[in-house]
Amino acid sequence: QVQLVESGGDLVQPGGSLRLSCAASVSIFRFEPLAWYRQAPGKQREVVATKPRTGSSIYADSVKGRFTISRDDAKNTVYLQMNNLKPEDTAVYYCYGFDKSAMMDVWGQGTQVTVSS
């Protein structure tokens, strides 16, 4: 079964950093693109960062300069490094990939990030 499993969510103070990980149960090359989304309480899910296999990463304006998406193909893992976190970054963060083999969307279960003093 194709799965994406997130980890790394936590409670952090404003200005702090976290790194989220998303491990795929199959070769990460099956997915194009890979991305991180988030959903805050009472709000719609929004894309945070997208990592195509080639070309530049794409970021939401609200996280540009603070978040970095990267991938480790050998580990079948995609990461989201989040720096200078703000209370408005509080949300459940989801890993997403489009599985080109099965022609379907694959979502992780989500990991909670809470930014609060």
Image (cartoon, rainbow, N blue to C red):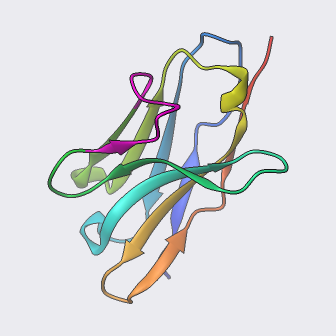
In depth, the one of 46 and 17 nearer the eye is 46
User: Is 14 contained in the magenta span?
Assistant: no
* Residue 50 position within the rendered picture, expressed as x and y whole percent measured from the top left: 37, 51
* Residue 32 position within the rendered picture, expressed as x and y whole percent measured from the top left: 30, 68
Up-down relation of residue 117 to residue 39 (above or below): above
* Residue 35 position within the rendered picture, expressed as x and y whole percent measured from the top left: 43, 55
Residue at 79% x, 18% y is 116
Up-down relation of residue 80 to residue 22 (above or below): above
Residue at 75% x, 45% y is 40
Q: In which quarter of the image is residue 98?
A: bottom left
Q: Is residue 99 left or right of residue 72?
A: right
Residue at 20% x, 58% y is 53
In this rendering, does residue 75 appear at all? yes
Q: Residue lying furthest bottom in this view?
A: 102
How many numbered callouts? 0
Q: In this view, does 9 lie to the left or right of 81?
A: right
In this rendering, does residue 25 appear at all? no
Residue range in magenta is: 57-67
Main secondary structure along the magenta-highlighted residues: loop
Q: Residue lying furthest right in this view?
A: 42
User: Is 64 contained in the magenta span?
Assistant: yes
* Residue 24 position within the rendered picture, expressed as x and y whole percent measured from the top left: 42, 63
